[in-house]
Image (tube, rainbow, N blue to C red):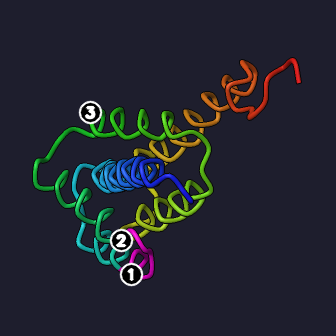
Amino acid sequence: MPDNHFFKGLMVKKSKLYDAFGELLYAIAIADGEVQKEEIEVLEKLLKEHPWAKEIKWSFDYETQKANSLEEVYAKAIDICKENGPDPEYKYLLDVMIQVADAFDGIVPQEERVINSFINDLKERFMHDLEENKLAFFDEDE
């Protein structure tokens, strides 16, 4: 029988990850200085079918309401992604980030920097973890 405590911990971790997704999407939208109506419309359309859409959008709306700085929000969110480790959902997030950035006047340099930072920050962290054998599920002695 599965350990319910394990699954409950996993859900908290996923919830935290999807909050970070909303924060990163806010970072991309605010990168050019203002969250545009077109960016919100694209975001809502893209999230419609995602099982965690409500959590992602709530986090995005929270950051929008609080008007936190791009740097502060990005740093907090990327730390959560790094803590989470590799995840197939990052490709989905990257696709959504690109489409949100492109929604109003195309992707501007500020938005491109956020996208590139996301890719590079995660790649750097995961390569380091791989080199340190922190991503392996076995001991080196096995």
Disc nearest the viewer among 1 and 3:
1
**Residue for badge 3:** 72
Whether tag 2 and tag 1 are in contact, CB under 8 A, the answer is: yes
Residue type at tag 3? Glu
Identity of the residue drawn at 30% across and 63% down? 55
In the figure, is residue 133 to the left or right of 39? right
Q: Measure the C-alpha gap from mark 2 to mark 1.
A: 6 Å
Horizontal and vertical percent for residue 137?
74, 35
Residue 98 x/y as whole percent: 50, 61
Towards the viewer: 60 or 11: 11
In the picture, which quadrant includes the N terminus? bottom right
Q: Earlier in the sequence, mark 3 or mark 2?
A: 2
Marks 1 and 3, how far apart at CA: 27 Å
Q: Residue flagged by tag 2: what amino acid is it?
A: Ala
Which range is magenta?
45-52
Q: Would you say the residues marked 3 and 2 are in contact, meaning their CB atoms lie under 8 Å apart?
A: no
Check if residue 95 falls in the magenta segment.
no
Q: What percent of the width, then of the height, locates residue 11?
A: 41, 55
Numbered disc 1: secondary structure:
loop
Residue 48 numbered mark, or none: 1
Secondary structure at badge 3 equals: helix
Q: Name the residue beneath numbered marker 2.
A: 53
Whole-percent x and y of residue 32? 31, 50
Q: Which numbered disc flags the more N-terminal residue, 2 or 1?
A: 1
Q: Is residue 50 magenta?
A: yes
Q: Which class describes the residues within 10 Å of circle 2: few (<14), some (14-19), or many (20+)? A: some
Q: Is residue 141 above or below residue 32?
A: above
Given this view, does label 3 or label 2 mark the residue nearer the observer? 2
- How far is mark 3 from mark 2, CA to CA? 23 Å
Residue depicted at x 60% and y 50% = 87
Residue 138: give its label: none
Give the mark, 1 or 3, whose residue is nearer the N terminus.
1
